[in-house]
Image (cartoon, rainbow, N blue to C red):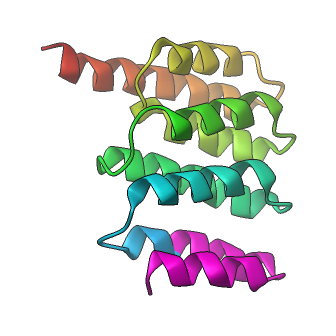
Amino acid sequence: MTFSEIQKLYRTKHDPAERMDLISAILQIEEADWRTVEVFVSTVLLEDTNSIVRHEAAFVLGDLREKGRIGDELGAAALQKAALSDKSPTVRHEVAEAIYCFGGTQVETTLRQLLNDEIEDVRLTAAMSLTWHSQYMAQFAK
């Protein structure tokens, strides 16, 4: 399945499970305009009505960044916004986990803000992710 096919199908699906499967399928794509993919997945993260679909979008953004397919800007901005504004603790937890591999001081700031989240699992994930972020960024400082 191509990204274009995924994008078209996503817009026609009302069942959240089908939308989640389509977002997950992005990880199987070998070639795409990754900037367009990043814009699409970031939009899903911020706008889909289902928290599990948004959770999956956060996961996909982190995975795409780890693979070097997307940069540090748009995806990180969407993750930061979701971290601080999404009402779902499931989404905030996944954002805390996915954001560690993005660069920039705003990522660390966002993770530190999540240390004060009302949900313990989000706080614990943010603490773990802060450690990962420091280790990840140290690789590039050498």
Residue 82, relative to residue 42: is it above or below? Answer: above
- In depth, the one of 79 and 32 nearer the eye is 32
Report the residue at 49% width, 60% height from top: 37
Report the residue at 40% width, 53% height from top: 64
- Quarter of the rendering occupied by the N terminus: bottom left
Residue 30: x percent and y percent? Answer: 29, 72
Left/right placement of residue 137 relative to residue 117 reads left
Residue 26 is at least partly visible in this image:
yes
Residue 83, relative to residue 24: is it above or below? Answer: above
Residue 19 is drawn in which quadrant? bottom right
- Quarter of the rendering occupied by the C terminus: top left
Residue 21 is at least partly visible in this image:
no
> What residue range appears in magenta?
1-24
Residue 118 is drawn in which quadrant? top right
Residue 69: x percent and y percent? Answer: 33, 51
Residue 92, relative to residue 61: is it above or below? Answer: above
Residue 47: x percent and y percent? Answer: 79, 53
Kindly report the secondary structure that dominates the magenta region of the rendered protein: helix
Residue 79: x percent and y percent? Answer: 62, 37
Q: Residue furthest left?
A: 142
Left/right placement of residue 29 relative to residue 60 reads left
Residue 16 on the magenta segment: yes
Residue 56 on the magenta segment: no
- In depth, the one of 36 and 114 nearer the eye is 36
Residue 12, relative to residue 105: is it above or below? Answer: below
Report the residue at 47% width, 46% height from top: 62
Left/right placement of residue 88 relative to residue 95 reads right
Report the residue at 64% width, 29% height from top: 80
